[in-house]
Each structure stands twice: as C-alpha cells, then as structure tokens.
Image (spheres, rainbow, N blue to C red):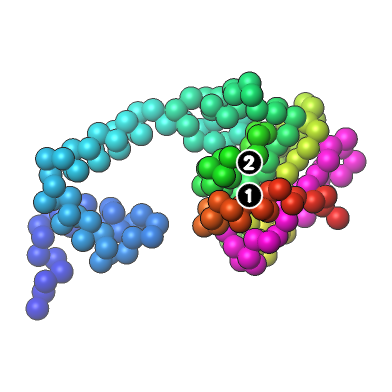
Amino acid sequence: MASQGSGGNEIERLASALARLPGLGPRSARRAVLWLVKRREDALVELLASLTAVRDSLVECETCGNVDTANPCHVCTDPRRDARSICVVEDVADLWALDRAKLYNGRYHVLGGRLSALDGVGPEDLTIGQLLTRVEAGVDEVVLAMNATLEGQTTSHYIAERLEGMPVRVTQLAHGLPVGGELDYMDEGTLAQALRARRPVS
Ligand SMILES: [Zn+2]
C-alpha cells in the first residue's frame, strides 16, 4: 500500500521542509501538515505571518552574535546590564536559555559552535578572535558557559588559555550540569544553580 506519497506535491514539499526542522521526523512533519491544513484559516495564516515577520526583521547582532530584531541587539544596548561581564556560549539557543533564567546580568558572546576535531571545527571557525577583541576593550569578567560535553569543555579550556595573562577574571559554570548536558535543555533552576556557583577556571 503506497500511502506515503498520497498527499500531492505541495503537501509533500511542505512535509519534507518541516521534516528538516530539529526534533521533527518525517512522521511528525506529516502530522503537523495535516493539522495545519485543517486549520488553514487561523493557525496556518498565523504561522505564515510570523514566518514572514521573522524573515523580514531578524538580524544577527554584530557585537555578540545574538539573533534579534535589532543590531546591536537589545541585550547589548540595555543600559541596566553590566557591560564589563561577558558570558560566552556556544549557540544562540544557549544565550536564550540563560537569559530566560534571568540570573545573569551581563552581556553575551556567541561562539557559533564548539571546537571539534571530528567535525573539522577549529578556533578560526568560531568567533574567538572577536571575543578577545571585546575583552581587550575592557572587561572585568568572562563567564565560560559551554555545554558539559567533551567538546564544550575542550572549547572552554582553549578560551581560558587564550585569555591567560589578560587582566580579566575567568570563571566557568559549576557543573552541577549533568555530563553531556546541553544548556538549552536544562531547566531554569539547574541553570541558575550552575551560574550562581560559577568558579574560577583552574
Ligand atoms: Zn548583541
């Protein structure tokens, strides 16, 4: 029984576009398409409008790498935030997770990934140079908030080494974070705890 390709070209196209989203396989993508088709007048229209708005207004902050509707982003321009503390994260999702926890009041720096010999990601592929420039411009503390994975920790050590000798306090998240833990999957309590108990990089 060939039930899989029975939805017509447009529907198949939508389903395979959705199936490329993280966390959605082909099966849930088809279910999402059916759900949207049944709610064409409200949910589909609303989804279209917000996708268009995102396409038209989102930009990457040239200072920190955040994704926002303004460049520099609202975090970098918020005068209530401590400009002399920078929290370094792997991805924008980590920045958002930490920011949701509302316990850190400095600014951020998004690396754009992690060092990985396996995937051929070297220091020049990340925004480490830009980070050093920001630190040289005058920063008191750098908080390394990499994921508790082997690659995350390798990245953390590498950056700590590059910061050695600079007049800046380098701390890292206390890893009450489970090993292998990725920041954007942490609940806010765990994140808050890790941030509060941050300690100097040894
Ligand atoms: Zn920014």
- Relative placement, left or right, of 1 versus 44 is left
At a point 54% along the width and 55% down the height, the residue shown is: 187
Q: In which quarter of the image is the N terminus?
A: bottom left
Q: In the displayed structure, would residue 39 be above or below residue 19?
A: above
Q: In which quarter of the image is the C terminus?
A: bottom right
Which residue matches tag 1?
A: 192
Q: Which amino acid does label 2 sit on?
A: Leu
Q: Where is residue 159 in the image (x, y as percent from the top left)?
A: 76, 48
Residue 168 is inside the magenta segment = yes
Q: How crowded is mark 1: few (under 14 residues within 10 Å), some or many (20 or more)?
A: some
Q: Position of residue 30 (x, y in %)?
A: 21, 61
Which numbered tag is attached to residue 103? 2
For numbered disc 1, what is the local secondary structure?
helix
Q: Nearer the viewer, residue 164 or 44?
A: 44
Residue 163 is inside the magenta segment = yes
At a point 68% along the width and 61% down the height, the residue shown is: 176
Per the rendered image, the range of residues in magenta is: 157-182
Seen from this angle, which residue lies furthest bottom?
1
Contact (CB < 8 A) between labels 1 and 2? yes
